[in-house]
Image: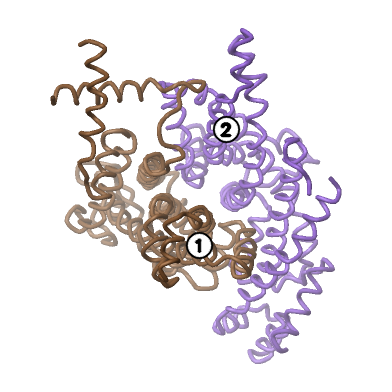
């Protein structure tokens, strides 16, 4: 098992290097005019005149040295966990990201739990009653969930309760340490919306897996033993069908992170998504690169964890 | 009807069926016959295209014509969906929004399909080191959450309809290339490919004449699914202010103007409903196409491994039809 994990960790390294190159090169595509815009809107206390500002920004972005040196410099920073400072706030980007991770993580975990609560029962029911009205409704619900624009639901939740009952979600972020109830209340609405949007895919995966498992011989054996349907479905089929569904968690992490951008914006949560949005709005390129690299790494690592868990759960998979 | 006659009838259908239609017409016939929900989806897509194409004829006002009514007017017969804060007719804007969605959806999924086919076939067919290099690049690219990379690239290239379409096309193209690649690998060792190679068919011709026709099914499915995803993604990034800039009536962009929604609920409702219906229709169609085109999923092995009731019914109907014909 440990050799398997080590092997996978080593395999991650080339991908990570490629990730940093992609991020690095994308920053390189900043048109020159953006530097003008930045120098024009630069806080006056940082620089005296426009030429100075340009030189300063070029220096901060590391544009004044050859390309490979720039990359080496930045890559060394990434490896040692130093992502540089924000152009606008001057804050340390690594710290900024670390501060915001718990917020996005809480939102993501709550959303994942919601999506499972919605998806698994409907998916299982749909498979057990294949090609009945219930199955059609279940499948339509799944596609409906996939098709729902999360940002629209979010907007409606903000707009309508406020029109009808004068209630609106808290505009201020409540830290979990200050008020647990208030914090949960604040997170639960965006989490449920994200969960709903995500549940469609999980629902379909659950259904497919259940259909496959229900045709296995051991399920026939369970029937032949005269077990009740409940016992066959829950104890014999579901237990096995759920294993591949674990992988979908890994597949949905990017979707989850993407969805959090929108929800954090609508519900005023200062998470990673907000950091990226603000940075993009201000063209704070070091922050943009930093957030992208951290998120891509997170996705890679979570996928690794999911694979390891999968290998652990399914004894048929050998860890080479 | 006796049992014997039924059996005789069922052998008749196998003779009756070979009537051959061109691929797409055959697909359409099967869609309408076997997939009612998919047909509904297809109709929704058709309506989107028709509304998009004939937008100037359908919309009573221009999409950016201000003060055709009072500001924030309730939905009425004059303004079916009400008006916005500067008196623009919301219905007209929704109708023109269909055109924007159509552009983005068709454009992005076309670019995506070409890119996915190119990357997937080259990577899958040539294999070896080329494959390894391409796949590592795709791996790295797939690590980025779609919305993150989308927002970042949009911030670099700047907002606009063409930019959104191209960026989405590239994004989905690279993402879908995986599926094309795996299909190419699965057919690569078939005898007909071997035969083509044996008679000295050049690689380019093999790919075009022998591989491509056999990977059309996943490409069509990907095209449909990507279209829905692209429309939704465009709306999301326009909502966040990085997509199509106002006053172009993008459904997502229309939803981002939250300031007046507290006074005018219709501003929050219509673009969202239009968007949901369109994406739902496309996904339904994509789902039906997948069932029809993917042989591994074809035919329902029904409840707990039996044959599904629907399939039995379908069979009976065909048998009956065949016996009546004779």
Residue at left offset 49%, top offset 58%: B188
Point out residue A126 in the picture as x, y percentages from the top left corner.
Answer: 50, 25
Q: Nearer the viewer, residue A41 or A278?
A: A278
Indicate the quadrant where residue A272 lies.
bottom right
Asked which colour scheme the image uses, the reply is by chain
Point out residue B315 in the picture as x, y percentages from the top left corner.
Answer: 30, 24
Q: Give above or below for A274 relative to A235.
A: below
Image quarter hosting the C terminus of chain B: top left
Q: How many angstroms separate mark 2 from mark 1 (CA)?
A: 27 Å
Residue at left offset 51%, top offset 64%: B125
Point out residue B320 in the picture as x, y percentages from the top left corner.
Answer: 21, 21
Q: Return the mark for residue A128.
A: none
Packing grade of label 2 (10 A; few <14, some 14-19, many >=20) is many
Which secondary structure, mark 2? Answer: helix
Give the labeled residue for mark 1. B120
Point out residue A46 in the picture as x, y percentages from the top left corner.
Answer: 73, 81
Please report, as a chain letter, where disc 1 is located: B
Image quarter hosting the N terminus of chain B: top left
- Which color is chain A depicted in? purple
Would residue A65 appear left or right of B162 to someone viewing this image? Answer: right
Q: Give above or below for A16 relative to A42.
A: above
- Which color is chain B depicted in? brown
Would residue B82 appear left or right of B127 to someone viewing this image? Answer: left
Packing grade of label 1 (10 A; few <14, some 14-19, many >=20) is many
Q: Is residue B245 visible?
A: no
Which secondary structure, mark 1? Answer: helix
Q: Nearer the viewer, residue B83 or B30?
A: B30
Q: Nearer the viewer, residue A65 or A98?
A: A65
Indicate the quadrant where residue A94 lies.
bottom right
Determine if marks 2 and 1 fall on one subunit. Answer: no
Q: Return the mark for residue A209.
A: 2
């Amino acid at each position: 098992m440990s050799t398997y994990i080590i092997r996978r960790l080593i395999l991650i390294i080339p991908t990570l290097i490629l990730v940093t190159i992609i991020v690095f090169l994308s920053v390189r595509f900043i048109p020159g005019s953006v530097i003008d815009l930045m120098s024009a809107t630069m806080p006056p206390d940082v620089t005296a005149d426009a030429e100075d500002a340009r030189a300063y920004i070029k220096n901060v972005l590391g544009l004044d040295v050859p390309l490979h040196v720039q990359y080496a410099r930045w890559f060394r920073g990434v490896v040692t966990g130093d992502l540089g400072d924000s152009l606008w706030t001057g804050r340390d980007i690594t710290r900024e990201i670390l501060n915001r991770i718990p917020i996005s993580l809480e939102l993501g975990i709550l959303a994942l739990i919601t999506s499972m609560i919605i998806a698994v029962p409907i998916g299982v029911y749909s498979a057990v009653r294949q090609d009945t009205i219930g199955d059609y409704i279940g499948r339509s619900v799944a596609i409906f969930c996939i098709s729902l624009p999360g940002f629209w639901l979010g907007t409606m939740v903000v707009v309508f309760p406020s029109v009808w009952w004068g209630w609106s979600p808290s505009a201020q972020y409540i830290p979990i340490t200050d008020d647990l109830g208030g914090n949960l209340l604040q997170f639960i609405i965006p989490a449920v919306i994200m969960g709903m949007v995500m549940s469609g895919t999980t629902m379909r995966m659950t259904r497919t897996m259940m259909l496959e498992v229900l045709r296995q011989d051991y399920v026939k054996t369970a029937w032949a033993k005269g077990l009740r349907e409940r016992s066959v479905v829950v104890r014999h089929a579901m237990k096995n069908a759920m294993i591949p569904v674990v992988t979908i968690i890994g597949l949905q992490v990017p979707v989850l992170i993407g969805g959090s951008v929108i929800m954090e914006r609508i519900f005023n949560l200062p998470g990673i998504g907000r950091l990226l949005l603000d940075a993009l709005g201000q063209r704070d390129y070091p922050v943009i690169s930093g957030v992208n690299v951290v998120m891509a790494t997170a996705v890679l690592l979570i996928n690794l964890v999911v694979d390891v868990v999968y290998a652990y759960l399914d004894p048929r998979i050998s860890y080479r | 009807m006796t049992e014997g006659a039924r059996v005789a009838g069922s052998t008749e259908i196998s003779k009756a069926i070979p009537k051959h239609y061109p691929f797409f017409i055959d697909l359409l016939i099967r869609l309408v016959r076997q997939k009612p929900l998919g047909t509904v989806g297809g109709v929704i897509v058709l309506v989107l295209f028709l509304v998009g194409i004939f937008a100037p004829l359908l919309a009573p006002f221009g999409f950016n014509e201000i003060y055709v009514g009072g500001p924030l007017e309730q939905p009425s017969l004059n303004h079916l969906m009400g008006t916005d804060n500067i008196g623009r007719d919301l219905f007209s804007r929704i109708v023109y929004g269909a055109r924007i969605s159509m552009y983005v959806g068709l454009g992005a999924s076309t670019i995506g399909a070409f890119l996915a086919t190119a990357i997937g076939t080259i990577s899958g067919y040539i294999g070896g080191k080329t494959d390894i290099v391409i796949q590592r690049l795709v791996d790295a690219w797939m690590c980025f959450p779609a919305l993150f990379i989308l927002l970042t690239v949009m911030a670099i290239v700047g907002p606009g309809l063409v930019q959104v379409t191209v960026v989405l096309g590239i994004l989905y193209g690279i993402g879908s290339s995986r599926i094309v690649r795996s299909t190419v690998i699965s057919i690569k060792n078939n005898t007909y490919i071997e035969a083509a190679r044996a008679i000295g068919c050049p690689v380019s011709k093999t790919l075009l004449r022998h591989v491509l026709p056999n990977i059309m099914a996943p490409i069509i499915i990907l095209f449909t699914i990507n279209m829905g995803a692209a429309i939704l993604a465009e709306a999301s990034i326009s909502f966040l202010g990085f997509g199509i800039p106002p006053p172009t009536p993008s459904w997502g962009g229309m939803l981002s103007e939250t300031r007046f929604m507290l006074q005018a609920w219709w501003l929050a409702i219509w673009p969202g409903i239009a968007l949901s219906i369109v994406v739902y229709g496309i996904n339904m169609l994509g789902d039906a196409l997948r069932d029809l085109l993917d042989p591994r999923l074809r035919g329902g092995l029904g409840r707990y491994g039996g044959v599904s009731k629907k399939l039995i019914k379908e069979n009976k109907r065909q048998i009956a039809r065949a016996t009546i014909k004779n």
